[in-house]
Image (spheres, rainbow, N blue to C red):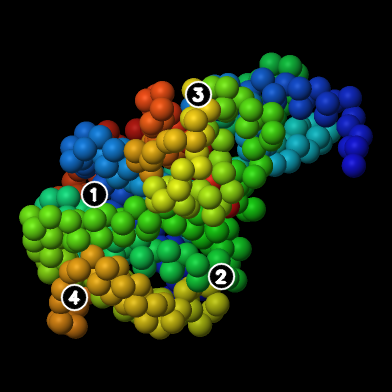
Amino acid sequence: MNDQQALYQYLLLLGDSPMILGHRLSELCGHGPSLETDIALTNISLDLFGQVRNYFQYAAKVQAEGKSEDDIAFLRLAHEHRNVLLTEQPNTDFAHVIGRQMFFDTFHQLLLEALRDSKDEQIAAIAHKSLKEVKYHTRFSSEWVKRLGDGTAESHRRMQDALDHLWPYAGELVQESPLEKQMKQQGIGADLEQIRPLYWERVNAILREATLEVPENSWFQAGGKKGIHTEHLGYILSDLQYMQRAYPNMSW
Amino acid sequence: MQQILTKEEAHIRKLLVEVTDPEIPVLSIMDMGIVRDIEIQEEKVHIKITPTYSGCPAMDTIAMEIKYTLEQAGYPTDVELILAPAWTTDWITENGRQKLEAYGIAAPLEESADKQALLGRSKVVKCTNCGSQNTKLVSQFGSTACKALFQCLDCLEPFDYFKCLK
């Protein structure tokens, strides 16, 4: 892969996780457990989509094939997506939604803090902008994990169930892929080796405060970053890409 | 420092004051601090704008409005969206803050006070209806990305708070 192709792929890697998670959250529009959480989750979804647009607009420019952000978002197949498996996990119940969000937000904030120093000016600008928004996401999801974990017997049980289910997907975020290593060496990408200990430290602190039991399993599912996904992604894409596939080249 | 404006630039600025944020229609984009640069070239006016939030759905409309307003007045216009430096609530002008309050949206506090307010730990957000500080956080996220939802415990009126963004 030459530098330009690597940068393009890295922008997909940065954009795909927030895009798929943003889509998962958008599924909750009108279905949140309360009006306030419904609005919060869809607000977060909107922030994520805005950030994804910035990455994909830039990716289209880097690719220089005359394609648009929409082509990148709506015309790729499942194996061409580089999102982590965590973001595909379904909205089983509110505890799963919040648990998934807490893992992602905790990582996302650390990632953006690191990307502010990227040698690539546009990535640094997107990171600066996004970080301001993501701080609010982190606060929201971590507070809810604590509230549910340290709440009633029922909310505790559900939060623990969600945690146990999501745990195998929590490690991929900080596992460095060859592409991320390459981009780190160029001074463009974030250093996941540095982020990893901070990520686990913050996650563990939240779970402890939430009185939840941290699973002992340290083997994690992975594959998303190289395009190997759970079966959920195909269903997500058939929904997300419906308009472009039904009406090719349509635009607003 | 007093900035000396050309007649043209003064006119363009005046026109831009008429362009409002469609989600907060009392507020001009000039009061919001969205317009970052006005460059008057021979053939065209080049305007740089920056989004408040990445996902702000109003940006496309604002860009169109700017182009429409200036071209109606005879200035062919280009609008460019820039991301750096990232927008901050500090760029909302004093006039803008007053208009927000009058419209029923509490203006953003400083960062530390904002954090305390949004964690429900201190009562620092003033009710826009009765001015009481006896208010409570209902939700950290409100009707648009930039706002949180509060309620006054004295007059019971619900109101929006414009979140601090730094």
- For marks 3 and 4, give the CA distance: 47 Å
The amino acid marked with disc number 3 is: Cys
- For marks 1 and 4, give the CA distance: 25 Å
Nearer to us: label 3 or label 4: 3
Please state the chain letter of the residue tagged with numbered disc 1 in the rendered image: A
Please state the chain letter of the residue tagged with numbered disc 2 in the rendered image: A
- For marks 4 and 2, give the CA distance: 33 Å
Which residue position holds label 3? B130
Nearer to us: label 1 or label 4: 4
- For marks 1 and 2, give the CA distance: 29 Å
Residue A122 lies in what quarter of the image?
bottom right
- Give the number of the disc on residue B78: none
- Give the number of the disc on residue A118: 2
Which residue position holds label 1? A24
- Relative placement, left or right, of A203 versus A234 is right
Depicted A183 relative to depicted B40: above or below:
below
- Counting from the top left corner in percent of width and height, residue A89 is at 17, 58
1 or 4: tag closer to the N-terminus:
1
The amino acid marked with disc number 4 is: Val
Whether labels 1 and 3 share one chain: no
- For marks 1 and 3, give the CA distance: 40 Å
Residue shown at 36%/47% (left/top)?
A44
Residue shown at 45%/48% (left/top)?
B122
